[in-house]
């Protein structure tokens, strides 16, 4: 498909909007979207950037819904955050509802009284962030999960982490918490989950990202056989055995730094979303950078240059589409959880 006419429209709309608009783009977006980024980043970086765009009337967020919601809660209420995809629901974010989280909370506080802090991954609904804010907890991203876990365990003896079992388990293990003190909460089996939680320090919700649980130790073994000396780095949403079989792990921004700092001639296989990996391969042509195996996030792919153009045009005519809003009560409590993270 010839994208040039769409690119010309985007260029024109941006010229007309000037400093009224700022475009934020997550690393997992395609090249046709990434090229328009005023800021590209991982989930944490984009949250920080969104909170600082005081001059912009419109913040156009090319990513998934929880990221745009976070931006909408952190920016000034007079600003508007737009999600070009219209609807881009990250499946993992919907694996923990507030109703189910409340049930787990009630059972665990019956066991431990208030000796428990809730932490939610940024990849969650605004309502779940608000739940954590209301109960003295915080948000974390894949860049700072270990830091937030440490913060929680300095205050109380237990923490519950929503909704990613693997980021939760990898972070707890990195802090030296043994596997037998990490319990998994299956919300379909609350009795069995509660029995498992007795004696646990960390309880992790049984949710996952299909883009990252796709990777297996067979992929790691195969790439090591084919490319002796290869360095393998994966995202912490990958299962524990994959993270342990890799040479390193980190958030998208940390993976990029790893590639940047690797000496010329390095061969690096990366276990995360394929758009970002192939782009890194092109940007660092003095190194060989390849996907551990190609795995794509269909939700990120919902943002296309055509949708970005339509969103920008709607701002030009003063009738913005796909505006993300969060009610005041949710925003108040969720912001508390977000600020606890951003202030650390
Ligand atoms: P980062 O926190 O690395 O940006 O990851 C967000 C995400 O959605 C990963 O699946
Ligand atoms: Fe959600 Fe996974 Fe896509 Fe990230 S990569 S947005 S966690 S489905």
Image (cartoon, rainbow, N blue to C red):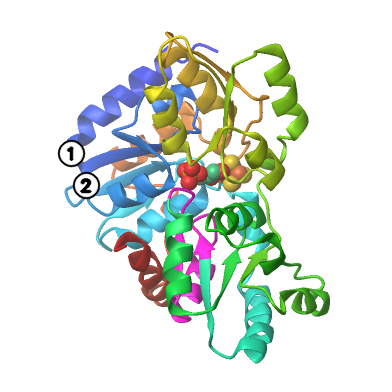
- Residue 245: percent from left, percent from top: 67, 35
Q: Is residue 264 left or right of residue 2?
A: left
Mark 2 surroundings within 10 Å by alpha-carbon count, few (fewer than 14), some (14 through 19), many (20 or more): many
Asked which quadrant contains residue 70, the reply is bottom left
Label 2 residue SS: loop
Q: Residue at x 60, y 52 (%)?
A: 170
Residue 136 is one of the magenta-drawn residues: yes
The disc label shown at residue 19, or none: 1
Q: Give the camera-side residue of 12 and 142.
A: 142
- The yes-or-no answer for disc 2 within 8 Å of ligand 1 is no
Q: Residue at x 38, y 23 (%)?
A: 260
- Residue 230: percent from left, percent from top: 59, 18
- Residue 289: percent from left, percent from top: 53, 17
Q: Work out which quarter of the rendered image holds the N terminus and state it.
A: top right
Determine contact: label 1, label 2, CB under 8 Å: yes
29 shown above or below 173: above
Q: Work out which quarter of the rendered image holds the C terminus and state it.
A: bottom left
Quadrant of ligand 2: it is top right
Residue marked by disc 2: 56
Q: Is residue 88 left or right of residue 14?
A: right
Q: Give the camera-side residue of 305 and 146.
A: 146
- Residue 332: percent from left, percent from top: 37, 74
Q: Residue at x 61, y 46 (%)?
A: 237
> Considering only order in the chain, which callout, 2 or 1, is on the residue closer to the N terminus?
1
Residue 194 is one of the magenta-drawn residues: no
Query: How far is disc 1 from disc 2 in space, using C-alphas?
Result: 6 Å
The stretch in magenta equals 120-143
240 shown above or below 160: above
Q: Is residue 193 left or right of residue 129?
A: right
Q: Residue at x 68, y 39 (%)?
A: 242
Label 1 residue SS: helix
């Amino acid at each position: 498909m010839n994208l040039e006419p769409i690119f010309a429209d985007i260029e024109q709309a941006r010229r007309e909007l000037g400093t009224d608009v700022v475009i934020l783009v997550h690393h997992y977006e395609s090249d046709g979207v990434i090229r328009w980024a005023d800021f590209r980043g991982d989930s944490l970086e984009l949250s920080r950037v969104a909170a600082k765009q005081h001059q912009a009337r419109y913040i156009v967020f090319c990513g998934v819904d929880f990221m745009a919601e976070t931006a909408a809660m952190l920016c000034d209420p007079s600003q508007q955050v737009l999600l070009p995809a219209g609807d881009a629901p990250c499946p993992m974010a919907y694996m923990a509802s507030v109703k189910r989280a409340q049930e787990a909370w009630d059972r665990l506080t019956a066991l431990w009284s208030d000796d428990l802090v809730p932490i939610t991954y940024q990849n969650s609904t605004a309502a779940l962030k608000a739940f954590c804010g209301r109960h003295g907890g915080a948000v974390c991203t894949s860049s700072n999960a270990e830091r937030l876990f440490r913060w929680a365990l300095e205050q109380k003896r237990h923490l519950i982490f929503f909704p990613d079992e693997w980021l939760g388990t990898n972070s707890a293990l990195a802090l030296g918490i043994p596997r037998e003190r990490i319990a998994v909460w299956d919300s379909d089996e609350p009795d069995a989950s509660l029995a498992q939680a007795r004696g646990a320090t960390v309880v992790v919700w049984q949710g996952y990202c299909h883009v990252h649980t796709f990777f297996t130790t067979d992929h790691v073994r195969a790439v090591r056989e084919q490319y002796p000396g290869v360095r393998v780095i994966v995202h912490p949403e990958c299962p524990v055995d994959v993270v342990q079989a890799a040479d390193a792990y980190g958030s998208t921004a940390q993976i990029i730094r790893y590639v940047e700092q690797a000496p010329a001639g390095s061969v690096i296989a990366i276990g995360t979303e394929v758009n970002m990996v192939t782009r890194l391969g092109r940007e660092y042509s003095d190194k060989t950078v390849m996907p551990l195996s190609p795995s794509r996030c269909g939700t990120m792919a919902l943002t296309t240059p055509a949708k970005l153009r339509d969103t920008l045009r709607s701002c030009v005519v003063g009738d913005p589409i796909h505006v993300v809003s969060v009610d005041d009560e949710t925003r108040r409590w969720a912001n508390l959880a977000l600020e606890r993270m951003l202030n650390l």
